[in-house]
Image (cartoon, coloured by chain):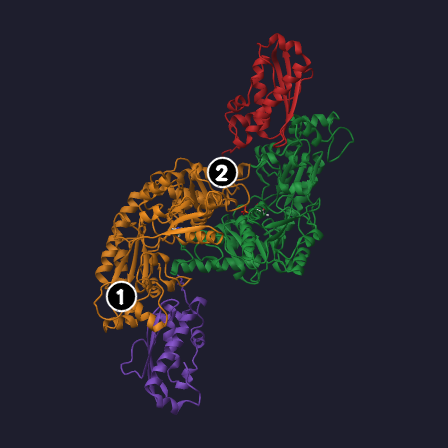
Chain colours: A purple, B orange, C green, D red
């Protein structure tokens, strides 16, 4: 076989094969670990936050190719965002940035959103003052 | 890059001589077997020969007991529903093993919606049917027992003789799905005491597009495909002549080659499992150990702390074609019901990979696979929060428990907020 | 001896370029489309292309509306039963034309045994459906109307637009069996107002072993083949990849070649019928005259005072392959229900022969057929007591009554002691 | 195609293609015409009988290949037999002599038997005296 056939589009494959931001952050400011009851995936996102901005993000994922690609892409996307911006983050951004996911795999992007939100919540719990200082008056909700 | 096809369970290439035998039936001998002229009569003769070849593969008495369908799934549907509808007045109860293929399971579920009842007989941790439970499940209303010969996921070989004896004693016809064994293990319908047997040539170097149903003349069955009077009125629709001809030859070759096939794959199976066990930590073989209770082509593996699809994709990117019974890999997002039936821990079911060997595989293929798979496991564990948490003693291994930390399932339930399904 | 294949209704040879397209999918690209590795993904792409080609043949919007089955019969079974079961709660009534293929008729009969009811709408002497009767047959409980595009026996083309309009007005999905027309007549699912359409590539120079079901997304349907989640869960079982690929190309070629096919066969059809009419006395064309109401490939003939099988066998011995709707030729010993539905006299139904033209037929073939057929009729009439009795004025002709003698049916009833069945 | 494939065995095909005793007997002593309600075949057998023996037999058949072959074979078989012998004639003789018929076509041989019996009956009706002289005491029944 000369051509290569892939289950996912080239962007997803690229993020699966060479995931960005893979790993843990030693002195993370917020860590979220979530699981998908639907398929058993587990995703963990660690954040480094400074001056209300996400300075660094890392992930670890137990899950399928699109779960790994989704967490890779999600960590890429949120770096540099403010907490408030990050709170508005949705899985659709991941899907779009990945150039689409198979319908049955959309939940992987949802898991990435949830892991990020969980990490932010963890940060907020640890640093309630930071949120007040940097939120644009919007309530912080999960 | 080396190409290693380790998914013979999904399909096999058509053998060149089988393809050669099929060729004339596309462009030249293209007649419809129902036609009464030269073009029809010629292919009718060819179908008869194929029926004889199929009968020989399973030691059936007569080619008149062989019916052609479109695939293994249709044969299973016909066996289950055809017998159920034919015996409706006798009773509306079926007995099946819990690890049958979805083509059997879902046919049964369809009947259940229409008022039939079904008892699913459990299997042990190796996937072998509980014979006492089977005997107890049969009632006077039971019109069919379905127990497959070999399981498609974990390769367990069922004790067919004992199953057949129980059915004979209770006077209930036995249907044996031989899709995962035909061409790779001896099959003898009389030794099995089988009233119905199904299989499909694309699993033993024959073409796709044809399934076989053996039916002992004493077993009552009605047609589920309605139309013309093809296949003695048992299956309407124009026969797929080239596939039937090719399938027949593939069956004939299988009879001759069987000892070779068993020896070759058994040797590779042992080497592959030994290699993986040595090179990959926290790996488990599901189903029986290689030997008399396991088909020589199949290895079903669970590698802990990593998930199946990632393993499969990385194998593929390294030229190794494998399958998986993990939920992430299936379109239905469900773990194989076979893995549930043998009580496999959720964590292990998620990390499932199925490797099925064939004649074209070599020792070099096996060694390459072991080496590559070990690297893949390391890479994915590097990405896995579970591996990290295991190393940190937060969760424990199922395969080799250390006594530290909580279970994966407990952890998964906690982080997902819902109990993990098995 | 000249070989003239005049049974294109039964099957057609696979075109060389179609066979070439299929070849790699037997021995090389042999993967199972459900597999997630290279072997599977490659054939998945091929299936998608074939779906697009099938969609183009019938002017469907999207390849997602195309499902693959094993043949035309299965497509018809799925259309009828799949819609019936899916809409059970809405109602259990079906409407079909009286001249549908057995795959439709017998699917309906199966449902009738399970509590559905069905109205069979009559046709005129030319086999064209009675539109008023159709409109009147639809009730609030009707979940499906089935009217084929072209009849397989007598070649009548149904007024699909009008049929579609009636179904649309009453809000009932329409299923159109296009097996006898696909590849030989333009088909436009939207013009037809069809919710479901079926056909099979082996009828237009594609392979056997694959059927197509188009289903408009608004039409509800459930699977009738239970098992894996192939074909979007609509049809379980390993796909017959090479046949699907070949069928797709055959569909694509058909789109291009259609005008040529229609012109070529129409010309031969006219020549054949003119020749037979001139050379054979007491011969009748069943179904519409060649023209807009009849497909250009089909001639359905009744030659009086002789029976169909003898004609067929003698044609074959002279190299001419034909079919027959006569009872002696069918395994069920029943005259084609289509001939009964158009009210064809028993005597003429018995002497029935069906000739179906194709692209390989030539004018020389036609002339040879006319000449040979005239000799055959003479030979068989020489053996027939009916011909003798007709000549002696004891029984009369149905085709060209002389006013002398009793009818054939009357005579047959007298000598057999029972009324002849029609 | 080099080989020839046939629906019936070579004997049946031979009798279909070159039927023996096809035609009518001008001055027949008995004529029987019967029909099969099952499939619509009609068969006519004419007999020439002399000294209680079937001297000649002819058939005409409206029917399928095996009906023509069956009548051809039946007329061959009964020539030279006595009336009593002919009365004992069964379709099985035809089937055997033809080397077998497809199951669905057995009724063709039955039709041949019936046509023969009808012709004999016709003869008996016309010549009651002949029967008494030559029967071996067995009653003549259809
Ligand atoms: C045990 C068993 N039965 C039935 C089937 C269905 O056969 P097919 O895919 O040929 O329709 C399979 C296919 O994997 C199988 O493994
Ligand atoms: C109108 C029509 N529908 C359905 C069928 C059944 O198709 P198949 O023989 O491909 O199963 C036929 C076959 O002759 C047909 O002519």
Dot 1: element: helix
Q: Earlier in the sequence, mark 2 or mark 1?
A: 2
Q: Is residue B69 or residue C301 the one in the foreground? A: B69
On screen, residue B386 above or below C307 = below
Q: Please determine whether, in this image, residue D108 is positioned above or below residue A135.
A: above
Q: Residues within 10 Å of mark 2 (few under 14, many from 20)?
A: many
Q: In the image, is residue B274 above or below residue C395?
A: below
The location of residue C152, given as percent across then percent down, is 61, 45
Give the image quarter of residue D18: top right
In which quadrant will I find the C terminus of chain C? top right
Subunit of label 2:
B
Considering every residue shown, the one lying at the far top of the view is: D133
Mark 2: secondary structure = helix
Which residue is farthest right?
A: C403
| Residue B316 is at least partly visible in this image | yes
**Image height of A63 relative to C376, above or below:** below
Q: Which mark is on residue B375?
A: 1
The residue singled out by tag 2 in the image is B44
């Amino acid at each position: 076989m000369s051509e290569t056939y892939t289950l996912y589009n080239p962007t997803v494959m690229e993020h699966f094969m060479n995931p960005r931001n893979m790993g843990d952050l030693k002195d993370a400011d917020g860590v979220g670990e979530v699981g998908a009851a639907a398929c058993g995936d587990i995703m963990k996102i660690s954040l480094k936050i400074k001056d209300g901005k996400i300075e660094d993000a890392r992930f670890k994922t137990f899950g399928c190719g699109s779960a790994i690609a989704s967490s890779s892409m999600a960590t890429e996307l949120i770096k540099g965002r403010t907490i408030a911006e990050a709170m508005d983050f949705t899985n659709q951004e991941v899907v779009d940035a990945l150039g689409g996911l198979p319908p049955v795999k959309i939940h992987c992007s949802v898991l990435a959103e949830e892991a990020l939100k969980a990490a932010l919540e963890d940060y907020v719990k640890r640093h309630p003052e930071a949120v007040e200082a940097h939120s644009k008056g919007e309530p912080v909700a999960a | 890059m080396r190409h290693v096809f380790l998914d013979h369970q999904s399909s096999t290439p058509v053998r060149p001589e089988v393809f050669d035998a099929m060729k004339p039936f596309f462009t030249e001998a293209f007649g419809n077997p129902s036609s009464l002229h030269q073009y029809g009569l010629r292919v009718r003769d060819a179908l008869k020969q194929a029926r004889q070849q199929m009968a020989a593969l399973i030691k059936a008495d007569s080619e008149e007991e062989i019916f052609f369908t479109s695939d293994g799934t249709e044969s299973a549907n016909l066996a289950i529903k055809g017998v159920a509808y034919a015996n409706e007045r006798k009773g509306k109860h079926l007995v099946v093993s819990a690890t049958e293929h979805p083509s059997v399971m879902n046919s049964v579920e369809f009947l259940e919606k229409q008022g039939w009842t079904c008892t699913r007989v459990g299997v042990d941790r190796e996937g072998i049917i509980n014979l006492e439970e089977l005997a107890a499940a049969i009632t006077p209303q039971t019109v069919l027992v379905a127990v497959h010969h070999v399981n498609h996921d974990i390769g367990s070989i069922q004790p067919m003789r004992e199953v057949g004896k129980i059915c004979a004693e209770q006077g209930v016809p036995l249907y044996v799905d031989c899709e995962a064994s035909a061409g790779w293990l001896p099959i003898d319908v009389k030794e099995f005491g089988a009233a119905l047997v199904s299989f499909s040539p694309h699993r033993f170097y024959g073409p796709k597009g044809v399934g076989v149903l053996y039916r002992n003349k004493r077993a009552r069955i009605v047609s589920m495909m309605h139309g013309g009077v093809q296949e003695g009125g048992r299956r309407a629709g124009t026969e797929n002549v080239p596939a039937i001809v090719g399938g027949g030859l593939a069956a004939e070759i299988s009879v001759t080659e069987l000892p070779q096939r068993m020896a070759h794959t058994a040797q590779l199976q042992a080497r592959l499992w030994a290699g993986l066990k040595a090179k990959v930590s926290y790996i488990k073989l599901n189903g029986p150990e290689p030997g008399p209770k396991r088909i020589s082509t199949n290895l079903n593996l669970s590698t802990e702390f990593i998930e199946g699809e990632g393993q499969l994709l990385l194998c593929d990117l390294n030229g190794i074609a494998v399958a998986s019974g993990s939920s992430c890999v299936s379109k239905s997002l469900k773990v194989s019901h076979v893995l549930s039936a043998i009580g496999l821990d959720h964590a292990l079911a998620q990390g499932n990979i199925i490797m099925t060997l064939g004649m074209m595989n070599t020792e070099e293929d096996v060694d390459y696979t072991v080496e590559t798979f070990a690297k893949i496991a390391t890479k994915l564990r590097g990405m896995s929060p579970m591996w990290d948490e295991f190393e940190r003693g937060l969760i424990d291994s199922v395969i080799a428990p250390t006594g530290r930390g909580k279970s994966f399932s407990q952890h998964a339930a906690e982080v997902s907020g819902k109990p993990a399904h098995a």
